[in-house]
Amino acid sequence: MSADRPLVGILVGSESDRERMQGAIDELEQRGLAHEFEVRSAHRQPDAVAEYARSARERGLRVLICGAGLAAALPGVVAAHTDLPVIGVPLRSSKSVLDGLDALLSIVQMPPGVPVATVGVDNARNAAVLAARILGS
């Protein structure tokens, strides 16, 4: 697999989510899988999120990983705008009253026809492992 052209896109709604997504970044780098990391909010930048998802395949991406907390809309919004596999990572938030369970339930309960694979709360590393398996590496 090419180390030059990203195959996996990692998307979060806030720069503050980067630290909790670092496990995915580290795992992809360890496996030699090229990736990109973007910050776009489903609530504050819905058009930018839709454009990112719609253009992902033509830009060479093959799997998308989306980290999200609280209402956790990002993975579902991305999945609604692409036919690529989307992996959701529910993230804990200091503002959450359910310690990440709210995000987990929001991501896992997608409507029919808009699938989002989901890993455990704050388990970005497993999202990268799943992305690698999807890619067959």
Image (spheres, rainbow, N blue to C red):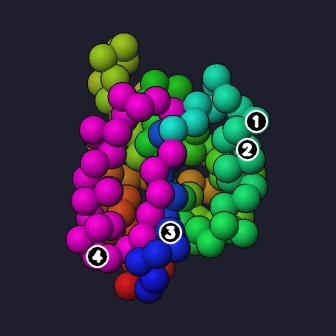
Disc sitting over residue 6 in the figure = 3
Count neighbours of disc 4 (C-alpha within 10 A) and say few if under 14, some if 14 to 19, many if 20 or more: few
User: Could you tell me which residue is drawn at 58 percent across and 31 percent down?
Assistant: 41
Q: Amino acid at mark 4?
A: Arg
Cα separation, mark 2 vs mark 4, equals 29 Å
Residue at mark 3 to residue at mark 1: CA–CA distance: 22 Å
The secondary structure making up most of the magenta span is helix
Per the image, the residue denoted by label 1 is: 47
Residue that appears at 25% across and 59% down:
26
- Mark 3 and mark 2 lie on one chain; the one further toward the N terminus is 3
Disc marking residue 31: 4
Residue 24 in sight in this render: yes
* SS for dot 1: helix
**Residue denoted by label 2:** 50
* Residue 40 appears left or right of 33: right
As measured in the structure, the alpha-carbon distance from the residue carrying label 3 to the one carrying label 2 is 19 Å
* Magenta segment includes 14: yes
| View extreme (front): residue | 4
The magenta span reads 13-38
Query: Could you give the CA–CA distance between mark 1 and mark 4, rounded to whole angstroms?
Result: 32 Å
Q: Earlier in the sequence, mark 2 or mark 4?
A: 4
Amino acid type at mark 1: Asp
Q: Dot 2: what SS?
A: helix
Relative to 62, does residue 25 appear above or below in the rendering?
A: above
